[in-house]
Amino acid sequence: MENNAPVLYKFSGAGNDFVIADGRDKDVAELRKVDVIGKLCREYSTDGLMILDYCPAGSDFSMEFFNPDGSGGMMCGNGGRCIVAFADMLGIRPSEGISYRFTAPDGLHVATILDKVPGKWTVRLKMIDVKGVTPMKGGYFLNTGTRHFVKFVDEDVDTIDVDSLGRAFRHDEAFAPEGANVNFVQEVPDGLRIRTFEKGVEGETLACGTGITASAIAAYKHGIKGRKEAPGRFVYDLQCHRGDWLSVAFSPECDSFSDVFLTGPAEIVSI
């Protein structure tokens, strides 16, 4: 593998950090091993590892995502924005129009780079449609490409013991056997503030894209008003724990949410 090993890069999506490798024409089998994933995430101090690779016709590339514990098979919203920025950095261009099309564990995604300066991009990423938001445990359960539990709090979200409370909900039998990521959300004058406990990381991360998306949709179900982008379409602004603001737009209809878009930053940290 040494002569054909991929170069590793570190990217950040609003404080959610990832090791990313270009797997095209490279030997990346070693990177998929659980112990190697954990070792790299520790060495690079990241919340996950991603591999960009070739994809069947109809997409520009594929995205593989792994948590530090080696688990995979789920979408990562911040990771999705970062891998689009990575594709742009590698010189990959959208095959159709101005938007990238890439496959992830939860299906096909479309993403557009809205702005970029050296080392930093703003990416608008289409997430999967969401069907079904279940009120339970004093909050809401839904799947935005990853399973999430969202709980709204009246107190300052910075005072929440995210590690202990998040771990309790993450392992609650109601979410067994897969478990769920846990989001604590506070309504503030400018929008929503959010902190997230992520399974697979087994601790708090500075941001979670699928959690931000889930929290915006849960806010709509909770009766919190977002901005109207167009008739029947709403936008929510959310601040993650690092301080970055991201936005989520969607069109609700009964218990379904379509044309869901997550917009936020992606930046390269190191090579």
Image (cartoon, rainbow, N blue to C red):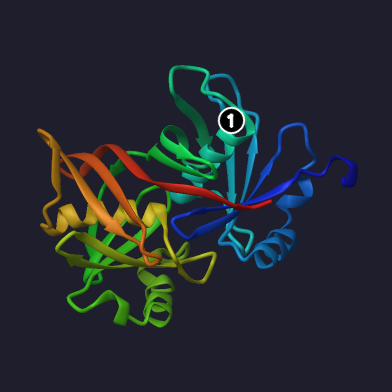
Neighbor class of circle 1 (other Cα within 10 Å; few <14, some 14-19, many 20+) is: many
In the rendered image, the quadrant that contains the N terminus is top right
Above or below, comparing residue 39 to residue 49 in the picture: below
Q: Position of residue 14 (x, y in %)?
A: 43, 56
Kindly tell me whether residue 32 is visible in this rendering: yes
Q: Residue furthest front?
A: 118
Q: Residue at x 48, y 28 (%)?
A: 100
Q: Position of residue 178 (x, y in %)?
A: 47, 62
Side of 13 relative to 151 (left or right):
right
Q: Is residue 75 visible?
A: no
Name, please, the residue furthest toward the right. 3
What residue did someone put label 1 on?
Answer: 61
Q: Position of residue 260 (x, y in %)?
A: 30, 39
> Residue at point 47% right, 60% down?
15
| Image mark count | 1
- Report the side of 189 relative to 76 (left or right): left
Q: Is residue 55 above or below residue 200?
A: above
Vertical placement of 239 versus 173: above or below?
above
- Residue 228 rendering spot, x and y as whole percentages: 12, 41
Query: What is the three-letter code of the residue carrying label 1?
Result: Phe
